[in-house]
Image (tube, grey):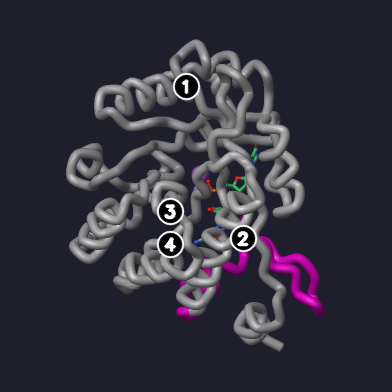
Amino acid sequence: LALETRLRRAIERGELALHYQPQISRIDGSVVGMEALLRWRSEEIGVVSPGDFIPLAEDTGLIHPIGEWVIRQACFQNKAWQNAGLPPVKVAVNVSATQFKAGSVSGMVAKALLDSGLAPRYLEVELTESVMLGDSAAAEAQMAELRAMGISLSLDDFGTGYSSLGYLSRFPLDKLKIDQTFVRNITTEQRSAAIAQATIALAQGLSLSVVAEGVETTGQRDFLGLIGCDVMQGYLYSRPVPAHEMAQLLAKGR
Ligand code: G
Ligand code: G
Ligand code: MN
Ligand code: NA
């Protein structure tokens, strides 16, 4: 069977799952947020990486039902954790430019919040610079709608796409995520360090919060701390983990 056919059946067959990666405060080590990351384990062909199936989903339109499943699952799971008495934190979901271009994101989110009972302040949407490219009126309108609902917007992979700095003032963002390609070389390469430092200064100047992605070493953590980044995400703290493990991290609080 073609991968597309398998992916089409993956939702109904229950082969999709969300894993969660905590975002950690450098100051006290507490869990201050989490990112939901999609995983697909096909019964016949095993684990398929999102790097392989997300582009296929975008090309075939399957990103729409899959993206809706992701948003709903993240909202219902986060609400379930809160109902179980775990400390409430935001869950961030990745949303493709394709979804924004179709104009379907804000409606899906509104319905997922209503159906799950999750308060909007506990949901964050991660988007990439490509959302703001080209004819971006639809994306801009949806971002404004999401913001008006009380959802926060985070710019993923910052600095790796094609956007201009002008987008940062035009679009209603709350957060920048320093891409892991800069974090990886931050202690060894002056250029990466400079880009990370400039990103943090820019975020501070625009009153945006900032998260560093792909933090793997204490050296990276310490350097990021010195240049003013207080929230970290990466293997140093935790890999993306299944929901039951995320619940344990929330229960421990760190
Ligand atoms: O978790 P991992 O590093 O394997 O993710 C690989 C890529 O897939 C990343 O770029 C990530 O943003 C993307 N991705 C993971 N989950 C989702 C999702 O639910 N929706 C979208 N659109 N992209 C996702
Ligand atoms: O594109 P996006 O930033 O959403 O994708 C995040 C991806 O980075 C996920 O696939 C996740 O599994 C991966 N990731 C998270 N933490 C680390 C890390 O510390 N090192 C590396 N190499 N990858 C990471
Ligand atoms: Mn992301
Ligand atoms: Na990223």
Mark closest to the chain's N terminus, 1 or 3: 3
Give the residue drawn at x 69%, y 31%. 237
In the rendered view, would you say 193 is above or below 144?
above
- Residue type beneath disc 3: Ala
Q: Which residue is mark 2?
A: 38
Q: Which residue is mark 3?
A: 119
Cα gap from disc 2 to disc 1, whole angstroms: 26 Å
Is residue 18 in the magenta section?
Answer: no
In this rendering, position of residue 106 left or right of residue 51 = left
In the rendered view, would you say 63 is above or below 205?
below
Q: Which residue is mark 4?
A: 96
Residue 6: give x, y in percent of width and height: 68, 83
Q: Which residue is mark 1?
A: 229
In the rendered view, would you say 245 is above or below 60?
above
Cα gap from disc 1 to disc 3, whole angstroms: 27 Å
- Residue type beneath disc 2: Leu
